[in-house]
Image (cartoon, rainbow, N blue to C red):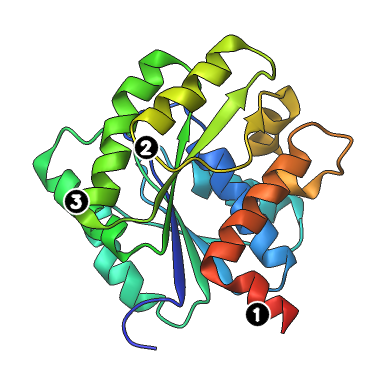
Amino acid sequence: MGDRPERVITVFAPKGGVGKTTIATSLLAAARLKGIDAAGVDLDAQASLTTWAEIRARQGRTPQIRTLAASPAEWPEVRRAEARRQLLVVDTPPGLDDDERLAAVRILLRDSDLVLIPAQPYAATLLKLADMGVALRSRDGSRAVFVLNQVIAGRAVLREAREWLAQRGAELCPVEIPLRDHVARTMGLGLAAVEFDDSQGGAAQMRTLWRFAASRLGFLAAEAA
């Protein structure tokens, strides 16, 4: 298997507050519910993913989910230590102003089999993210896909966001995650949106996001076989 896990998903955005950790929790929970040997990697000093996993463990929720806290510079060591793992889901820190951190994150992104970039459908967010996401694909060869998150259906800004990303050559995930209070509450409960039924808005979309990611990574093909 070499010095890396079978698959790596990185949830990345240099801007905070766009929903990286919430998406990471659902990807992790969905993978574990499918019996995949998955773990989370928390590279954010705020440790939101680690805190979520600790709350989950205290609540005795299943499936159990392991997370590892590290700095971006420690990613190569984490990759080697978790080389037997089927899947790592990496939650990244906001802010890439430091050259050393930027270099470390670029190594991570090159190592990733899929990079999901959550973005709110507003100009202030998209201006910061879109060109960087396209550059990752063209310059570094990263498999970067935008996920419109915290959206309100039917709003003109949502249509404009889709068009704006398409004009810049960005790949857009076919599912969009709605703005729902209960999705935000999952973090404090040690739960993930994929663990709710479809009557809870956002649960079905998070499951669809997992299926999208799993298909890209070959996990759905493995299930079918």
Residue at the spot of label 1: 222
Q: Amino acid at mark 2?
A: Ala
Query: Residue 82, located in which quarter of the rendered image?
Result: bottom left
Q: CA distance from mark 3 to mark 2?
A: 17 Å
* Residue 54 seen in the figure: no
| Image location (x, y in percent) of residue 33 | 74, 64
Residue at the spot of label 3: 139
Q: Return the disc, 2 or 1, that comes first in the chain's sequence.
A: 2
Say what secondary structure mark 3 lies in: helix
Task: Name the residue at 73% across, 35% down.
Answer: 202
| Image location (x, y in percent) of residue 221 | 65, 76
Say what secondary structure mark 1 lies in: helix
Q: Return the disc, 1 or 3, that comes first in the chain's sequence.
A: 3
Q: Nearer the viewer, residue 17 or 69?
A: 17
Q: Return the disc, 3 or 2, that comes first in the chain's sequence.
A: 2
Classify 63 as above or below 106: below
Q: Nearer the viewer, residue 160 or 101?
A: 160
Classify 195 as above or below 134: below
Residue 13, numbered circle:
2
Q: CA distance from mark 1 to mark 3?
A: 31 Å
